Image (cartoon, grey):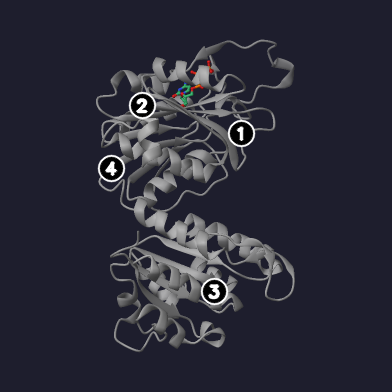
């Protein structure tokens, strides 16, 4: 699986450092050539000789050992894995600090960076760590774990290094997926639109943007040139995305039209308001003048317009439904001339602004109910399927085989 793949494993100063030996052993067993980088603190917990024996290569421990040790360590690497990653290394990465062999190598890495935190639960939950994790995620680093369990300090809680098997599975998966969207341009829309009545009132919906941002980020991770057009959300877009903020459906429509000719695929996760006010007031309407009724006009169905133009592009739509996911989803797949439709279940306490969503994938060959699925995982599943449209149109049968 990992034959001919180059993996850099950075070990930092956590008591879980001993488990990095097992991770390296598994990666080497899978066929990878592994280069280990160690911070000074890591060497208090485990010696370089262990890794030299397991990987057949002397670990890189000193930034000044040779001219460009940090660059050499990650040159042509398929992945850089930091396991275990301490709260300190996470903070340094969030700030862009480069003062040792690991932090300099991360900044020099031209490959996906996976981070496996391990620390005491209080440190994991500390506000500064939470903030730093948000920042490193926005910077495009992927965080795996930690898990809940026995901690080395004797406590039980969150902060245990993810299991070796899962880390190796994620590394293998990311290497296989990396570059699948290289040379492709993707347009992703996300979040709600707002249709203003006056400067203080609008029609909107509870979309958080989480689904669309997860798709855009994963597309960029896979090498796709990705444009993210987003309505107002509380999320920070990754810096390697071309980011286009919009507010109303009309603005979204305009932005989508302006990019459509340049892209190979469009994923419309935006929750577009179907109507806007016939009239918009520039001044705030005082309550004594507030009308009992409003005239609404229809917004254009942006995705249906794209479906009519299509011209070889792959189109993925979403359908937020409270019931009848399959039936309504299939109708929309056909009506909007889509390649793939993701029907998702929404309700008052369901779907919107959650990290998980109940989804059914529908294409012209059939459908696959996924059940409650993490939005990040769903993003991966959608992009796996989307990539196949660039080669042969997928069927549910050949996806299962592959
Ligand atoms: N969509 C769009 N433009 C609109 C409304 C929706 O491009 N004006 C897109 C959404 O981004 C999503 C899909 O169409 O990909 C969702 O359609 P949905 O809102 O479920 O369908 P509607 O056409 O609004 O149908 P209904 O409200 O009747 O369910």
Q: Which residue is mark 4?
A: 184
Q: CA distance from mark 4 to mark 2?
A: 17 Å
Q: How many marks?
A: 4
Q: CA distance from mark 1 to mark 4?
A: 29 Å
Q: SS class of the residue under badge 4?
A: loop
Q: Earlier in the sequence, mark 2 or mark 3?
A: 3
Q: Is residue 348 visible?
A: yes
Task: Tell me whether circle 1 and circle 3 mark residues in contact (CB < 8 Å).
Answer: no
Q: Quick one: label 1 or label 4, which is nearer the N terminus?
A: 4
Question: Which of the marked residues, 3 or 4, is nearer the chain's N terminus?
Answer: 3
Q: Secondary structure at mark 2?
A: loop
Residue density around tag 2, few if under 14, some if 14–19, many if 20 or more, within 10 Å = many
Graded by Cα atoms within 10 Å as few (under 14), some (14 to 19) or many (20 or more), the crowding at tag 3 reads some
Residue located at (58% from left, 75% from top): 16
Other residues around mark 4 within 10 Å, as few (<14) / some (14–19) / many (≥20): some
345 or 69: nearer the viewer: 345
- Asked if 254 appears above or below 124 in the picture, the reply is above
- Looking at this view, is 285 or 268 the one in front? 268
Q: Which mark is residue 372?
A: none
Taking the image as shown, residue 15 lies to the left or right of residue 59, namely right
Mark drawn on residue 351: 1
User: Can residue 255 be seen here?
Assistant: no
- Quarter of the image with the N terminus is bottom left
Q: Which residue is mark 2?
A: 339
- Of the two numbered discs 2 and 3 in the rendering, the one whose residue sits closer to the viewer: 3
Task: Name the residue that disc number 3 marks.
Answer: 19
């Amino acid at each position: 699986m990992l034959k001919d793949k180059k993996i850099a494993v950075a070990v930092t100063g956590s008591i879980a450092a001993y488990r990095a030996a097992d991770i390296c052993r598994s990666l080497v067993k899978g066929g990878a050539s592994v280069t280990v980088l160690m911070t000074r603190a890591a060497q208090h917990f485990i010696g370089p000789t262990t890794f030299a024996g397991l990987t057949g290569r002397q670990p890189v421990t000193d930034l000044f050992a040779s001219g460009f040790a940090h660059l050499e360590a990650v040159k042509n690497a398929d992945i850089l894995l930091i396991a275990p990653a301490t709260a300190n290394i996470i903070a340094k990465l969030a700030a862009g600090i480069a003062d040792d062999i690991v932090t300099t190598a991360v900044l020099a890495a031209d490959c996906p960076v996976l981070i496996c935190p391990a620390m005491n639960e209080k440190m994991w939950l500390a506000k500064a760590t939470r903030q730093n994790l948000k920042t490193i995620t926005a910077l495009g680093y992927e965080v795996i774990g930690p898990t809940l369990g026995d901690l080395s300090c004797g406590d039980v809680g969150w902060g245990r290094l993810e299991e070796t098997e899962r880390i190796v599975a994620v590394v293998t998966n990311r290497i296989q997926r990396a570059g699948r969207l290289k040379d492709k341009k993707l347009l992703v829309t996300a979040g709600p639109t707002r249709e203003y009545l006056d400067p203080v009132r609008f029609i909107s919906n509870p979309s958080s943007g989480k689904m669309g941002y997860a798709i855009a980020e994963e597309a960029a991770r896979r090498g796709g040139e990705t444009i993210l057009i987003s309505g107002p959300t509380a999320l920070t877009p990754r810096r390697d995305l071309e980011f286009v903020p919009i507010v109303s459906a009309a603005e979204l429509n305009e932005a989508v039209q302006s990019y459509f000719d340049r892209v190979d695929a469009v994923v419309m996760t935006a929750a577009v308001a179907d109507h806007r006010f016939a009239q918009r007031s520039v001044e705030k309407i005082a309550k004594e003048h507030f009308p009992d009724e409003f005239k609404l006009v229809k917004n254009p169905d942006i995705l249906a317009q794209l479906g009519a133009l299509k011209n070889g592009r792959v189109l993925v739509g979403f359908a937020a439904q409270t019931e009848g996911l399959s039936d309504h989803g299939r109708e929309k797949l056909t009506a909007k001339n889509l390649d793939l439709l993701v029907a998702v279940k929404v309700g008052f306490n369901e779907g919107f602004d959650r990290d998980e969503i109940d989804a059914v994938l529908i294409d012209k060959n059939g459908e696959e109910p996924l059940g409650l699925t993490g939005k990040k995982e769903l993003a991966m599943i959608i992009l796996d399927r989307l990539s196949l449209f660039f080669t042969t149109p997928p069927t549910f049968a050949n996806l299962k085989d592959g």
